[in-house]
Image: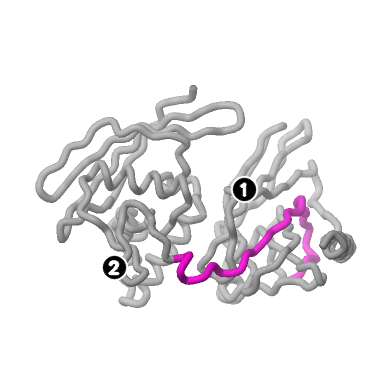
Amino acid sequence: MKKSSALFACLFLAAAFCFAQTVPENEAADGPQAEVSIAFTERSIYYPGPDRPVPVTFTVTNPGPGPLRFKLADDRFFSLAFRARNTANRTLPESEEWIRRRSGASQIYFREITLEAGESYSFTENVKDYLSIPEPGLYLLECAFFPELRRLPDYSEPNLTSNRLTLEIKPEPAPAAAAGYLGGGTQTEGILQPQPLSPDQVVATVLAARQKSQWERFFLYLDLEAMLNDDPVRRRRFQAESESGRREMIENYKTELMQSRAENEISLVPADFQIERTSYTESEGTVTVIEWFDYISFRERKRFTYNLARRDNIWRINGYTVDNLGTE
């Protein structure tokens, strides 16, 4: 057993060495050199397939004494490129989403960002939007950043390479394990069913599910269509879509929430929460919650006001607002 483990470790280190030899060296545009890095947004168990996201936080930092300027595409596919190799030194292919988005874009929209000395800029991306990972295994993952945008499909344009992460994709769990009981709902033939909880219990269930990354239970009490239509721009697009287009928009919105983007604050992971006040009528309710978020050197406090509506005796969240209460 020890010999097998040692042999596997040697093979993986050899693959890492080959990976280091085959990726292009960092290139940057004229001006101060940026530093780029990636980290798992939340350490979790990852599985194969496009519907099981692998959220990674990308950070660009200005280590120099002067300002650092770069372009960032609205569609991140034109600013980033993820690369991964397995222990056999084989490169993972691009995802169907990456191919579709790259081939369909006729114009690249971007904004220019300036970082002062010591400042950083971060955002979260789903690796599986970029790469197809159909099988379990051990992979070396890195990210290339293109400060002047990526217009070509290769790496000939100036780019900076991040650190490497070891990504382990586990085999899909057996159906019996995947159908295990989750609190806040009951199982009917393997499907989690909502329960007639009170508004405050619904909110507590959603927050507890987010803390444990139990996505099925998290979405169980969210009215995703109503939340999506809360944005005027998305509402106009949603109303203009066909039925299949609307379903796709809702699925894309779920993916955004699972990526924990900063603009979707409901999907951020609270370290603690306390329900402050609950009020409701026969069909509408409001629950106010104080939530705490832990960072490296401070704790942030926010007040979330969740709006709920009851349909068929089930309360669901259909919108929310957030007030920042400072740090502790």
Q: Please state if 31 lies on the left or on the right of 321 as rendered.
A: right
Of the two numbered discs 1 and 2 in the rendering, the one whose residue sits closer to the viewer: 2
Q: How many neighbours does mark 2 have within 10 angstroms: few (below 14), some (14-19), or many (20 or more)?
A: few
Cα separation between marks 1 and 2: 32 Å
Residue 203: horizontal and vertical position, in percent? 30, 44
Residue type, mark 2 in image: Gln
Residue 314: percent from the left, percent from the top? 20, 56
Q: Out of 167 and 33, give the one closest to the viewer.
A: 167
Residue drawn 56% across and 33% down?
295
The magenta segment is 154-178
Q: Does the magenta stretch include residue 252?
A: no
Q: Where is residue 120 in the image (x, y as percent from the top left)?
A: 66, 38
Label tally: 2
Compare marks 1 and 2 and give the one earlier in the sequence.
1
Q: Between 120 and 203, which is closer to the camera in this rendering?
A: 203
Where disc 2 sits, the SS reads: helix
Residue 294 relative to residue 232: left or right: right
Amino acid tagged 1: Glu
Q: Which residue is drawn at 69% across and 62% down?
A: 82
Q: In which quadrant will I find the N terminus?
A: bottom right
Q: Is mark 1 on a helix, strand or loop?
A: strand
Q: Can residue 259 be seen in this view?
A: yes
Point out which mark residue 168 bears. none
Local crowd size for mark 1, using a 10 Å CA cut-off: few (<14), some (14–19), many (≥20) = few
Q: Using the rendered view, name the quadrant where residue 224 is placed.
A: bottom left
> Measuring 43% from the left and 44% from the top, which residue is drawn there?
265
Residue 169 colored magenta? yes
Q: Which label sits on residue 112?
A: 1
- Give the residue furthest to the front: 1
Mark on residue 239? 2
**x and y percentages locating residue 242 in the rendered image:** 32, 77
Residue 24 visible within the image = no
